[in-house]
Amino acid sequence: MPVEVLEVNVGQQVNFDDIDFLFLGGGSDREQNLMAEDLLKRKDALRQAIEKGLVVLAICGGYQMLGQYYLTHEGQQIPGLGILGLHTRAGHKRLIGNIVIEVNIDGEPVKVVGFENHSGQTFIGNLNPLGKVLAGFGNNGQDGCEGVRYKNVFCSYLHGPLLPKNNQLTDLLIGLALERRSAKTELKPLNDELEEAAVKVMVNRLL
C-alpha cells in the first residue's frame, strides 16, 4: 500500500480528518512541553477525529498527554489534553526493562512484547487497558494493567519498537485505518516467521 508520511511541526496546520493513522511519541521534558502547548490548541479537532474513529498510537509521553494531567514531584499539576479520563503522577522509581503483556486481538489472547522506560505512573480509572501485564511493570507497577484502548486509540508505554516486533497488533491498526475509509480490510499475508520467533524468544526469557 502506498503511504505518505506527514511530519507535523509546532504551529503547522493539520486536518485530522485527512489522516488515517496518527502517531504521538515521547521526548525530553522540554520537547514534551512544546508539543503539549501546541496540541492544546488542536485538542477539540483531535477529540472530534478520535470520536469519528481516527487510529491513534500514543507512546509514553504521547500517552500521558492525552490524559487529564501530570502531577510532578513538587505537586504541580501540568494539564493534559483531557481527551481520555486518565492521569499520571511522577514516581520515585524508574520502571524500566523488557515487558510482556496479553492483548485481546479479534477475540484471541496475543502476547505482545516491548521495552518500557518511564518514571511516570499512569492510572486509567474506568478506561479499558490495552493489555494485562505478564512480566514487567505496565502503567504503574501496581494494578497489572498496561496502556489504554479507547475506540481506535491505542496508548502504551511499550517502546522497542512496538509495531515491528508485534505483527498482529500492527495488522490490527492497519485494518482499522482501512476500515475507517471503508476500504478493503483483508491484508495480503506476509511472512512473519522472524518476528514471531523473536517474540517467542522474549516471551520464553521473561516468562
Image (tube, rainbow, N blue to C red):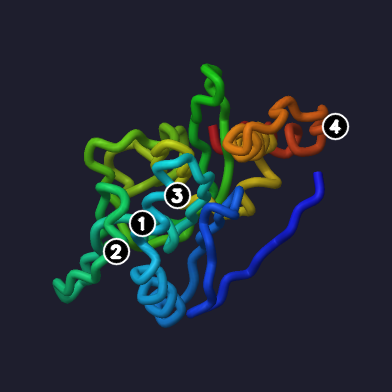
Which numbered disc covers residue 80? 2
Quadrant location, the C terminus: top right
Asked if labels 1 and 3 touch by Cβ distance under 8 angstroms, the answer is no
Where residue 154 sits in the image (x, y, percent)? 47, 43
Could you tell me if residue 146 is visible in this image?
Answer: yes
Question: Which residue is depicted at the point 81% across and 37% down?
Answer: 194
Which numbered disc covers residue 159? none
Which numbered disc covers residue 66? 1
Q: What amino acid type should be assigned to the residue bearing mark 2? A: Gly
Q: Which picture quadrant has residue 183? A: top right
Work out how far the residue at label 4 is from the one at label 1, CA to CA, in angstroms: 35 Å
Q: Earlier in the sequence, mark 1 or mark 2?
A: 1
Is label 4 or label 1 in front? 1
Q: Earlier in the sequence, mark 4 or mark 2?
A: 2
User: Label 1 neighbourhood size at 10 Å, few (<14), some (14-19), many (20+)?
Assistant: many
Q: Earlier in the sequence, mark 2 or mark 3?
A: 3
- Residue 139 vertical placement versus 204 (above, below): below
Where residue 136 sits in the image (x, y, percent)? 45, 44
Asked if labels 3 and 2 touch by Cβ distance under 8 angstroms, the answer is no
Where residue 192 sits in the image (x, y, percent)? 80, 33
Q: Which picture quadrant has residue 60? A: bottom left
Q: How many tags in the picture?
A: 4
Asked if labels 2 and 1 touch by Cβ distance under 8 angstroms, the answer is yes
> For numbered disc 4, what is the local secondary structure?
loop
Work out how far the residue at label 2 is from the one at label 3, CA to CA, in angstroms: 17 Å
Could you tell me if residue 205 is visible in this image?
Answer: no
Residue matched to label 4: 191
Q: What amino acid type should be assigned to the residue bearing mark 1? A: Leu
Residue 79 left/right relative to 61: left
The answer to which of 20 and 137 lies nearer the viewer is 20
- Residue 114 vertical placement versus 171 (above, below): below
